[in-house]
Image: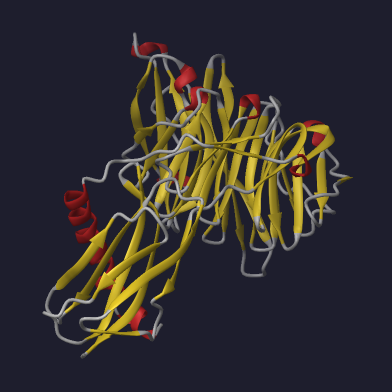
Amino acid sequence: MKVVIKRKGLLIVSFIMLLAISTLVFSVQSARAEDTHDITAKDVISVNSHLYGVAYGSGIYIAVGEKGVILRSTDGVTWAQVNTGTTEMLLKAVFGNGLFVVVGYNGSVLTSSDGLTWINPIYFTDTSHLLMDVAYGDNIFIASGSYHYATNKTQRYFVIGTKNANGNWTWQAQYPVETMSNVFATGITYGNDQFVSTGFTFDSSLGSNPSYNIVSIIPKGKDTYSMKTYYVGGATQLLKTWAWVAYGKGIYVATGFGGTIMTSYDGITWTQRGSATTNDLYSIDYGNGAFVAVGTGGKVVYSIDGIAWYTINTGSSIVLQGVRYCKDSFIAVGDQVIVRITPPIPTITFTSPVWPDQWAIGTTHDITWTSSNLNSNAILAMFYYDGSSWNYFASAYPSSNSYRVTIPTGIHPIPYAYIWMCSWVDDNCETTAYTVFSVTAY
């Protein structure tokens, strides 16, 4: 294992090289499985409340919804309602640094350390404020929303939660200056040392193209007054608006109406992806190597890389409003239902060779591995580093979990040789694996 860590940087470079080589040699075509995975009845729990958000932390699950309802659970199966002291509709929840934060209508912000006792740390004197989402990162909570400040005028605002020197949480509202008359904030997430807030603007003065999706970047250590806002394309219909956003594996993924899915590596430049649905997608989260998005008609879609998307069948048409990765699975909530979702994560695990195995020059061996939930056959490549460059001496597109190889006689003993595999879907590796061995003399 020490060897693998030492060579990690070079190994990443070689992966890129081998992808190109394998694509040329074997004419690998992008593959995409239109498979559907079912959720069993035991994964669906009926409740008496319409729910919109969910969160998990410190062994506690919470689900939030209409009329100030918060349900609490210690196992994700048995849920009990707790007293919140509010009747406002609660939309989203998150956990970070030992604290649950819930946001919703009329600027509602509720906090709790145990999911039982809730306080409202910041109040708004009018009913024009609406908080749509909340995220945690860099020891800061940021909730995103909008408020009406005049007739037909809407502006974004944010609620910031930080810990002071005494270890107490303090909260403040921030109102960045907008350049358009109607700007709506929707989702927010933290990743790659920045918060990314999504939303849209609608301004009739723009003529035939009045609606734009927008994204705002809030760098680490900065507040929303210093954020930068970018207009992402033009949409002639608000139904094409993307609203919710998550971050994982180095990529931001935003979902929205009409099955819209957009991805970005920096939060600024976005690319539209196919989502395997035209249903509205109301929420997205990342965890355990997968993105999961939920929406109307009980629709659940998942992706390993944010680019190729697949369907999970809930067996129901109930609207799902929120989803979070909680402990060891995703929990989705909606109209009187809580659903546990475990997407089929693709895996590859080598069984031979494994370090410190030694294969001699001129001998023949079977490379073996186990795999599960792959949406494509895997590409295999063997290579080594000779001190100045990377060299490969075998590559294949095997149809089974075994591949026979003979160590070439024209090479020298190699202290560290590598075998790498990739399940190739939609021009990306949905999962990779590698193993290390050494090549010895005859």
Position in image of residue 7 (x %, y %): 29, 78
Out of 227 and 339, give the one closest to the viewer: 339
Out of 305 and 374, give the one closest to the viewer: 374
Question: Along the horizontal axis of the image, is 198 left or right of 378?
Answer: right
Residue 94 seen in this snapshot: no
Q: Is residue 399 above or below residue 104?
A: below
Q: Furthest residue to the bottom?
A: 441
Colour scheme in use? secondary structure
Give the mark count: 0
Q: Furthest residue to the top?
A: 208
Position in image of residue 120 (x %, y %): 76, 46
Q: Quadrant of residue 268?
A: top left
Looking at the figure, which quarter contains the C terminus?
bottom left
Looking at the figure, which quarter contains the N terminus?
bottom left
Which residue shows up at 85% across the image and 47% down it? 79
Position in image of residue 194 (x %, y %): 43, 53
Out of 8 and 69, give the one closest to the viewer: 8
Q: Is residue 310 above or below residue 163?
A: above
Residue 172 seen in this snapshot: yes
Which residue shows up at 67% across the image and 32% down it? 320
Q: Quadrant of residue 129?
A: top right
Question: Along the horizontal axis of the image, is 20 left or right of 189?
Answer: left
Question: Along the horizontal axis of the image, is 34 left or right of 44?
Answer: left
Question: Along the horizontal axis of the image, is 139 left or right of 31?
Answer: right
Position in image of residue 32 (x %, y %): 40, 38
